[in-house]
Image (cartoon, rainbow, N blue to C red):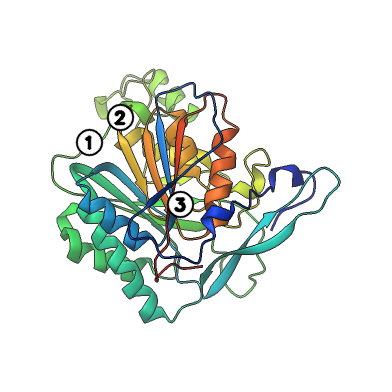
Amino acid sequence: MGRGTFEHNYQALNLSQLRTTEIDAVPVALALSPTNTSTATAIDLYCGDNLAIGRWLLSQNVRYRLIYLDPPFGSGKTYGARVNGGKGVQSEVVHAYADDADFDHYLQWLEARLVVARDLLADDGTLYVHLDWHAVHYVKVMLDRLFGRDRLLNEIIWCYHGPSPITSAFKRKHDTILVYTKSRSYYFNADAVRVPYDQATVRTFRSSPKAGFGKVPDLERGKVPEDWWYFPVVARLHGERVGYETQKPEALLRRIVLASSAPGDHVLDLCGGSGTTAVVSAKLGRHATLADANPVAIEKTLLRLQRLEQLPQVRLWRYATATNDE
């Protein structure tokens, strides 16, 4: 896990109120230091088991136009986070989350949360489930059952570069994001995510009126991206790194949030991790709700939100249950 020059980003808050031995009957609102918020955007951070939090949100009759899930991948590993770094001070690694459960148990764990995510979607909502080669084929079948095969909108491939020790196979350098909609009437803003055409394409169409068999695209407007995306991993984005091993890049979430939500919409992430969904949502004027069982993840998210130029209204919650995953 990267460290060194950017140790100052690998901080910790150690909020004692997140580390309770008591059991909460309902989510408990925790006080934060007063901040001068500069936007009306609201971010809710829940520390607790995401299944319990999801079911509680269902009981409150809230629904979300966009839900992004970046759950454990069924990798058989455990992951860490760096904390207590600073200028001239090397950070230490603490536990972030375990992904070493028996595979059948893992699939059962994930399915329960996918059911809640489906039920929390608005009628025009979209669910993005971020996985990799370990379990994506199993989970696709699961989602086909939960949503119906005709509700698969996309299978997005996120490609990236990076070192790999593999020499006996091709390097595994992509993740898969399965995209399902609640109904046929889903929200998708194609214009918000258009990208420029490749310069070779531009030159081809400008060179001959017969290019494209008479179908000339709007070269100035750009195109809707294909279902394979290249974004660098966070290890190569030193300004974003906060010392959370499975942190996702903001550019990836930015495209998802822009495509499947509008300003003022509510976004849900039940596997909050280092908080990229919250940060991107705040920057784009969306309200966001994040859940994670590990206080370190919630604290990393809170620190990232506090560093934004335009500060959102942040509310912190604890929901300690007997099923909290530490």
Closer to us: mark 2 or mark 3? 3
Lower position in the chain sequence, tag 2 or tag 3: 2
**Label 2 is placed on what type of residue?**
Ala
Name the residue that disc number 1 marks.
187
Give the structural element (helix, strand or loop) at label 1. Answer: loop
Q: Mark 1: few, some, or many residues within 10 Å (few <14, many ≥20)?
A: some
Percent x, y of residue 117: 27, 55
- Against 208, residue 180 (above or below) is below
The answer for how far apart the CA atoms under marks 1 and 2 are is 9 Å
- Against 62, residue 17 (above or below) is below
Name the residue that disc number 3 marks.
272
Percent x, y of residue 262: 30, 29
Lower position in the chain sequence, tag 3 or tag 1: 1
Name the residue that disc number 2 marks.
262
Percent x, y of residue 247: 56, 51
- Against 135, residue 251 (above or below) is above
The answer for how far apart the CA atoms under marks 2 and 3 are is 20 Å
Tell which of 110 and 301 is nearer to you. Answer: 301
Residue most extreme to the left: 184
